[in-house]
Amino acid sequence: MSGHSHWATIRRKKGAVDAKRGAIFTRLAKELVMAARNGGGDPDTNIHLALAIEKARAGNMPKDNIERAIRRGTGDDKDAAAYEEMTLEGYGPHGSAIMVECVTDNRNRTVAELRHAFSKNGGNMAEPGAVGWQFERKSYFTFPASALSYDKAFELAIDAGADDVAEDGDNIEIIGPVEVFKTLGDALHKIKVTPDEGGLRLIAKQDLELGVEETLQVLRVVETIEDLDDVQNVYHNLKISDEVLAVLEAE
């Protein structure tokens, strides 16, 4: 997974994702809304909401915006637009598999925009289940290695029921079954480790290994899809090699 993490880190540093502050706030607000809707408005009992609040604060989202989004999620804001979550599937170039999680107030618009993004970049939308079988949903946390040693992270993760702990030098990743998400999140919170990223994410069961140019081509498609307003998360099955990371860092 470290290649995926490195790629995300590089793009965050370069500001390639959500370059406009308004786009950042919109995406963060939707995450807050859905977290509050699905688990309630109390971050002490809703680890998804607690992580979404941390992410919003890290993105310099004003406190009023955060509170408003939570009220929309809990239903206290009756004037708010109705959002729904949807997961769409597609094929990118070179047989790559792509899963897209969206939060939208207009399903038809979202599907049309996503279909267009796939088709103009050498891919196509897929029927439900055609791509999804290649992925499994997992609890996922990543945080700086400076925040917690690998040995301590490994001990914490295993005690909480995680499947895997990886270190790539700068970051530590913990992956586990869906049902241990809250246990892992609470354990990290207890020792005051704030994850750079934490949530339930789709992880490919098997990575697709392509050449450098082909991999970069698929990643450009992923970036194009990520820039759509209704898209929250994009997952793919690419193996991201050190050679690819070197090209991305040099751009």
Image (cartoon, rainbow, N blue to C red):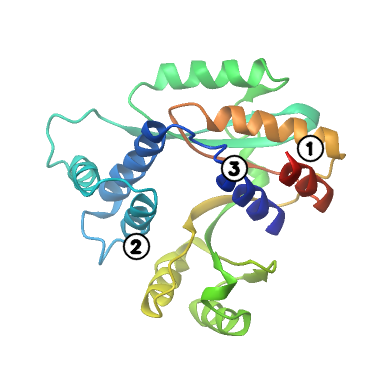
Q: Residue at x 59, y 72 (%)?
A: 145
Q: Quadrant of residue 154?
A: bottom right
Q: Residue at x 76, y 35 (%)?
A: 216
- Foreground mark, 2 or 1? 1
| Crowding near the residue tagged with mark 2, few <14, some 14–19, many ≥20 C-alpha atoms within 10 Å | many
Which corner quadrant holds the N terminus?
Answer: bottom right
Q: Residue at x 57, y 37 (%)?
A: 16
Q: Is residue 81 above or below residue 205?
A: above
Measured from the top left, where is residue 92 in percent x and y? 71, 29
Quick check: can you spot residue 225?
yes
Q: Nearer the viewer, residue 119 or 57?
A: 57
Q: Residue at x 49, y 26 (%)?
A: 228
Q: CA distance from mark 2 to mark 1?
A: 34 Å
Residue placed under numbered mark 2 in the picture: 47
**Left or right side of 32 for 245:** right
Say which label, 2 or 3, has the lower sequence index. 3
Disc 1 is placed on an element classified as: helix
Say which label, 2 or 1, has the lower sequence index. 2
Q: Is residue 115 above or below residue 64?
A: above
Residue placed under numbered mark 3 in the picture: 14
